[in-house]
Image: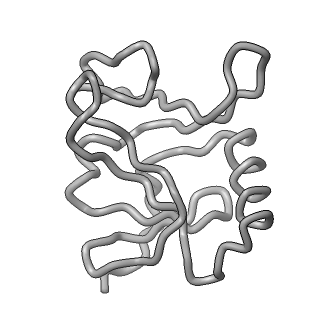
Amino acid sequence: MATTSTTQPITLTEGAVTHLKRLMEEKSVPEHYGLRIGVKGGGCSGFSYILGFDEKTDKDEEYTVNGIKVYMEKSHGIYLLGMEVDWLEGLNNRGFTFSNPNATESCGCGTSFNA
């Protein structure tokens, strides 16, 4: 298994951390699970973000970001380094948002990008 790193490739805003901790409690996420952040091919701009709770795999690096275990495949770092994950709670928008400095273009939904 990959080792835990102290260098944080992404940031989680206070709003994101609050909502993630609430979700972890409401969904009774097991202690050994972490927040999986990654990318997958697809979406209207080329890549889509992965965000969910999962077990660590042999491909993962583990980080602690604002007290939350984060699992990310090492190969995804090139696409996600410096990204900020936020939680919006508004009348028109509600959900996680991704501010990714590596994205050369993104779609209107905010969950798809090209690098």
Across and down, in percent, residue 103 comes to 29, 25
What coloring was used for the rendering?
one colour
Q: Point out the image quarter for the C terminus.
A: top left
Decide which of 13, 39 is in the foreground and name it: 39
Q: Residue at x 59, y 35 (%)?
A: 96
Q: Residue at x 64, y 33 (%)?
A: 95
Report which quarter residue 25 is drawn in.
bottom right
Q: Residue at x 71, y 64 (%)?
A: 24
On screen, 35 above or below 111?
below
Decide which of 38, 83 is in the foreground and name it: 38
Counting the numbered discs, the total is 0
Across and down, in percent, residue 82 comes to 41, 38
Residue 82 horizontal side relative to residue 94, left or right:
left
Q: Point out the image quarter for the N terminus.
A: bottom left
Across and down, in percent, residue 81 comes to 34, 43
Across and down, in percent, residue 54 comes to 48, 70
Residue 37 horizontal side relative to residue 18, left or right:
left
On screen, 78 above or below 7?
above
Residue 84 horizontal side relative to residue 68, left or right:
left
Decide which of 67, 58 is in the foreground and name it: 58
On screen, 25 above or below 104?
below
Q: Residue at x 75, y 59 (%)?
A: 21
